[in-house]
Image (cartoon, grey):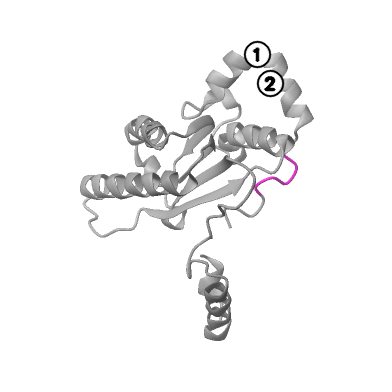
Amino acid sequence: MYAWRKWTPEMREEVLVRRKLLNRPWHGPPHYTGQQTSQYLITGTSYEHTPILGAAHERMDAFVPLLHQAFEEAHAVIHAWCILPNHYHVLTTTSDLPALLARLEKLHGSTSFTWNGEDNARGRQCWHRATDRAMRSEAHFWATVNYIHHNAVKHGYVAKWTDWPWSSSHDYLRETGRDEAARIWKAYPLGDYGAGWDD
């Protein structure tokens, strides 16, 4: 989205022609549904990474059950989650990715309407779709768990996982145990996981 603004008209036309030939959305990331997996990292991002979601702690508090309800209604299991002021990540198992994405689209629409009313900003775009990344292996799955729980630290909001209230890290540490969580952290390091996602 951000690179698009820097491209020449010729570069934009070339990309659009290629996306049309591949039957992909013209101006957004494709949603892959052909992998041999049912586990995905779902990311919802505020438009231009504006911290609309994080405008107030109360807004983030209210968004947590709404997000969980959306996954529940889509019959998708949540393994790990984190909500930040301008995006969220959820690691999920779902047998119907299109249905889950459609449910998240409704969530984005309803929260946009509510927040724009609260902020006296009717017509503002709050969300820029949701993306999905398929889990390729067990290692990819556990690295993703670590990435999600480390996300607030990565973005500089807190120094420790447990300092961030809007994630599953607290439940994860309680259920897994700190020793096992430390083992998983070392066994499945982040490396450059997520590099460039927020560019």
Circle number at residue 88: none
**Which percent across, then down, holds residue 43?**
51, 46
Name the kind of residue labelled 1 in the image: Gly
Q: In this picture, is 134 found above or below 91?
A: below
Per the model, the C-alpha gap separating discs 1 and 2 is 6 Å
Q: Is residue 97 magenta?
A: no
Q: Residue at horizontal 47%, vertical 68%?
A: 27
SS label for mark 2: helix
Mark 1, other Cα within 10 Å: few <14 / some 14–19 / many ≥20: few
What amino acid is labelled 2 in the image?
Ala
- In the rendered image, residue 11, in percent from the top left (x then y), is placed at 58, 81
The quarter of the picture where residue 179 lies is top right
Quadrant for the C terminus in the image: bottom right
User: In the picture provided, is 184 more to the left or to the right than 33?
Assistant: right
**Front residue of this view, candidates 35 and 30:** 35
Q: Residue 60: x percent and y percent?
A: 38, 35
Instruction: State the image coordinates of residue 196 (x, y, percent, origin top left).
Output: 64, 55
- Toward which corner of the image does residue 188 lie, by quadrant? top right
- Residue at which label 1 appears: 177
Task: Tell me which secondary structure the magenta stretch mostly adopts.
Answer: loop
- Residue at (69, 44) in percent of width and height: 136
Is disc 2 surrounded by few (<14), some (14 to 19) or many (20+) residues within 10 Å? some
Compared with 145, 20 (above or below) is: below
Identify residue for label 2: 181
Foreground of the two, 120 or 115:
115
Which residue does the image show at 30% across and 50% down from the upper left? 109
- Asked if marks 1 and 2 touch (Cβ < 8 Å), the reply is yes
Residue range (magenta): 190-194
